Image (cartoon, rainbow, N blue to C red):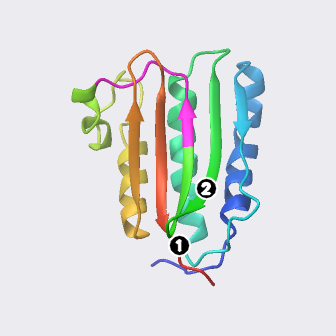
């Protein structure tokens, strides 16, 4: 059962950013945080939103090589809040893009294959979606898009 709260998307992003700070330092990954000072407080389940962001970040860190870049940013426009997770990993082949959201399929056989499917299910449950842009050899951009329901 979702608990509707009034979280500030920016504080959720900062919380997620802080939880990956040590891994970024250890692996010499440049972990960038963009901010949207005008991000409004929204009506949603803050714990679930944080879980989606964390799953997207875990995926980004998993595929980004040591010394790479992961960025996290929030943007509000056109009635939605967009939370972007960008990485400098290997990118995803077009024919693999839908499979990464299928449970128990792992591209490298080292994971459970549940992180991205769970993130997608939670995004849908929150009335949103996950968008993916990727270029092989040039990383990926996963975006959590949530409807802007103001307090």
Of 62 and 98, nearer the camera is 98
The numbered disc on residue 54 is none
Q: Residue at x 51, y 43 (%)?
A: 56
Q: Is residue 92 one of those drawn in magenta? A: yes
Q: Which mark is residue 75?
A: 2
The structure residue drawn at horizontal position 31% and vertical position 43%, both measured from the top left corner, is 101
| Within-10-Å neighbours for mark 1: few <14, some 14–19, many 20+ | many
Q: Alpha-carbon neighbours of circle 2 within 10 Å: few (<14), some, or many (≥20)?
A: some
At x 71%, y 44%, the residue is 34
**Residue 148, label in figure:** 1
Q: CA distance from mark 1 to mark 2?
A: 11 Å
SS state under label 2:
strand
Task: Report the span colored magenta.
Answer: 85-93
Question: Marks 2 and 1: in contact by CB < 8 Å?
Answer: no
Mark nearer the N terminus (1 vs 2): 2
Where is residue 69 shown, x and y percent of the image?
Answer: 64, 24
Instruction: Residue lying at the far left in this picture: please name it.
Output: 95
Q: Quadrant of residue 42?
A: bottom right
Q: Give the main secondary structure of the magenta stretch.
A: loop
Residue 84: within the magenta?
no
Q: Quadrant of residue 1?
A: bottom left
State the image coordinates of residue 109 (x, y, percent, origin top left). Answer: 35, 23
């Amino acid at each position: 059962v979702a608990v509707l709260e009034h979280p500030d998307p920016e504080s959720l992003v900062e919380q997620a950013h802080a939880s990956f700070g040590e891994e970024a330092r250890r692996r010499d990954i440049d972990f960038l945080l963009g901010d949207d000072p005008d991000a409004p407080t929204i009506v949603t389940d803050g714990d679930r939103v944080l879980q989606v962001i964390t799953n997207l970040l875990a995926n980004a860190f998993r595929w980004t090589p040591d010394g790479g870049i992961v960025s996290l940013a929030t943007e509000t426009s056109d009635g939605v809040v967009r939370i972007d997770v960008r990485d400098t990993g290997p990118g995803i082949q077009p024919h693999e893009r839908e499979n990464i959201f299928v449970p128990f399929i792992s591209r490298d056989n080292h994971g459970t294959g549940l992180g991205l499917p769970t993130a997608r299910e939670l995004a849908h449950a929150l009335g949103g979606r996950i968008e993916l842009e990727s270029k092989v050899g040039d990383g990926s951009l996963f975006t959590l898009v949530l409807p802007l329901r103001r307090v």
